[in-house]
Image (cartoon, rainbow, N blue to C red):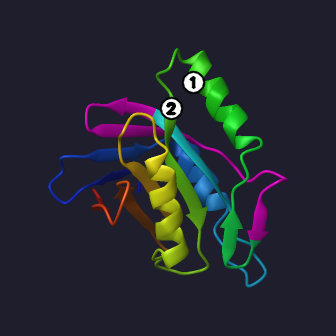
Amino acid sequence: MSAWGTADRKTLVHFSEDTLIVFKRHIQYKATDSEAGGLLLGTVHGNHMLIEQATIPTKWDKRFRTMFERMPFGHRAIALSRWNASSGKVRYLGEWHTHPEDYPTPSGLDRSEWNRLSSLRQDGRSMLAAIVGRCSLYLELVPIEGEGPRLVGIE
């Protein structure tokens, strides 16, 4: 599903087909599949976001069955390149990673890392956090502290 929003529809998020393809390629179907993840890059339109790209895991990232640690190498260069090429329109909007679950839920570690990353945002916006499961996505707008609104699929 490419369209998501808060329950009140005040914030809408659309994932490009390329982004969804990246998610699908990294779903942990097998017991030996490691978690994957990266950055979410896109444009902001008022309260709404268009996610144009999800970076893919690099050789420097740490990948295990139930843990993914994104290293800055590679991801940061892609984000900066997209920022510069778009004259600042395409920007970092959040993070994605997989879980070996049908219907993923964030762990305590996920939440603390999301809050840390959200606090580093220079534009003061909440960060979009995505967990890719085998059957669904978990999406949340993460403020600097605590839980933010969860997004639901829009048909």
The image's mark for residue 83 is 1
In front of the other: 34 or 72: 72
Who's the residue at 67% across and 79% down the image?
66
Q: Position of residue 17 (x, y in %)?
A: 52, 44
Q: Residue furthest right?
A: 59
Q: Are marks 1 and 2 in contact (CB under 8 Å)?
A: yes
At x 46%, y 68%, the residue is 111
Amino acid at circle 2: Arg
The disc label shown at residue 91, or none = 2
| Outermost residue toward the bottom in this view | 31
Q: Which segment is the magenta one?
A: 43-63
The x and y percentages for residue 53 are 57, 40
In front: 58, or 127? 127
Residue visible at 52% across and 14% down? Answer: 87
Q: Quadrant of the N terminus?
A: bottom left
Q: Secondary structure at mark 1?
A: helix
The quadrant in which residue 77 appears is top right
Quadrant of the drawing holding the C terminus: bottom left
Amino acid tagged 1: Trp
Residue found at x 83% / y 53%: 60
Element type at marker 2? strand
Give coordinates of residue 71: x percent, y percent: 73, 52
